[in-house]
Image: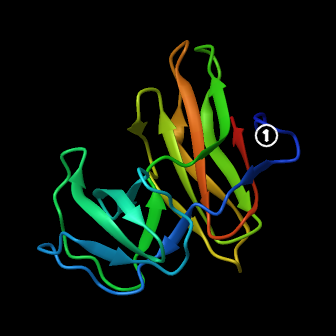
């Protein structure tokens, strides 16, 4: 049975909040990186793999950066790797009552999208990041039957490779 809804009944408009690296960066590179689209602003924290990077300044798709933000470790990142804002757009938030089982989530997006399913204080359960391609615009992500505690909160965040609507619904 589908139960949950989006924050907005027609879905949530998700801004263009991820792109890809235009060229590789080495772990020792500390000065700049170049991305495919100019969507970030000075002060944004972006994530590549498991590394957080702060955008120090930019005027073009080449940006001055500070590596290893939030105590992450600078790493090698190849051309074409996804660069996303650290925090996505929240498209679903539901607090459980302790008697409703959770058994999966439906996600969809108009564009290539990334979804993060998290519980409570940034605890990822099941699939921390899930990718949809333009040829797979919706999908059901099953989970082991799970009984959330009273007050436990499920949040779904989305990143889109272009402006578009993303939706999420949970099932029990």
Q: Farthest residue to the left: give it.
A: 28
Q: Residue shown at 58%/46% (left/top)?
A: 157
As drawn, 122 above or below 66: above
**144 versus 54 height, above or below:** above
Q: Residue at x 18, y 69 (%)?
A: 30
Q: Position of residue 87 (x, y in %)?
A: 49, 46
Q: Residues within 10 Å of mark 1 (few under 14, many from 20)?
A: few
Any part of residue 1 in sight:
no
Quadrant in the picture for the C terminus: top right
Q: Is residue 17 left or right of residue 56?
A: right
Tally of marks: 1
Mark 1 residue element? loop
Report the front residue among 76 and 156.
Answer: 76
Residue that label 1 marks: 2
Q: Extreme front residue here?
A: 59
Residue 117 visible in the picture: yes
Quadrant of residue 6 within the rendered picture: top right
Residue lying at the far right of the rendered structure: 10
Q: Is residue 37 found left or right of 32 in the rendered image?
A: right
Which residue is more in the foreground, 162 or 96? Answer: 162
Q: Is residue 39 above or below residue 135?
A: above
From the viewer's perspective, tell me whether residue 56 is left or right of residue 110.
left
The residue at 48%/76% (across/down) is: 60
- Residue 125, image x, y percentages: 43, 42
Colour basis: rainbow
Q: Quadrant of residue 70?
A: top left
Q: Nearer the viewer, residue 153 or 77?
A: 77
Q: Position of residue 76 (x, y in %)?
A: 20, 76
Q: Residue 1: image x %, image y %? A: 79, 38
């Amino acid at each position: 049975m589908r139960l949950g809804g989006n924050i907005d009944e027609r879905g949530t408009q998700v801004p263009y909040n991820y792109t890809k690296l235009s060229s590789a960066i080495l772990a020792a590179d500390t000065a700049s990186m170049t991305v495919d689209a100019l969507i970030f602003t000075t002060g944004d924290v972006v994530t590549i793999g498991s590394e957080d990077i702060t955008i120090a300044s930019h005027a073009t798709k080449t940006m001055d950066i500070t590596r290893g933000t939030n105590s992450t470790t600078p790493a090698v990142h190849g051309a074409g790797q996804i660069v996303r804002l650290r925090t996505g757009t929240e498209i679903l938030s539901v607090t459980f009552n302790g008697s409703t089982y959770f058994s999966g989530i439906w996600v969809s997006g108009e564009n290539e999208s990334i979804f993060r399913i998290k519980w409570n204080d940034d605890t990822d359960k099941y699939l921390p990041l899930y990718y949809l391609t333009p040829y797979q615009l919706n999908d059901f992500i099953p989970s082991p039957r799970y009984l959330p505690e009273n007050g436990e909160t499920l949040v779904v965040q989305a990143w889109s490779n272009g402006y578009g609507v993303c939706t999420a619904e949970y099932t029990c």
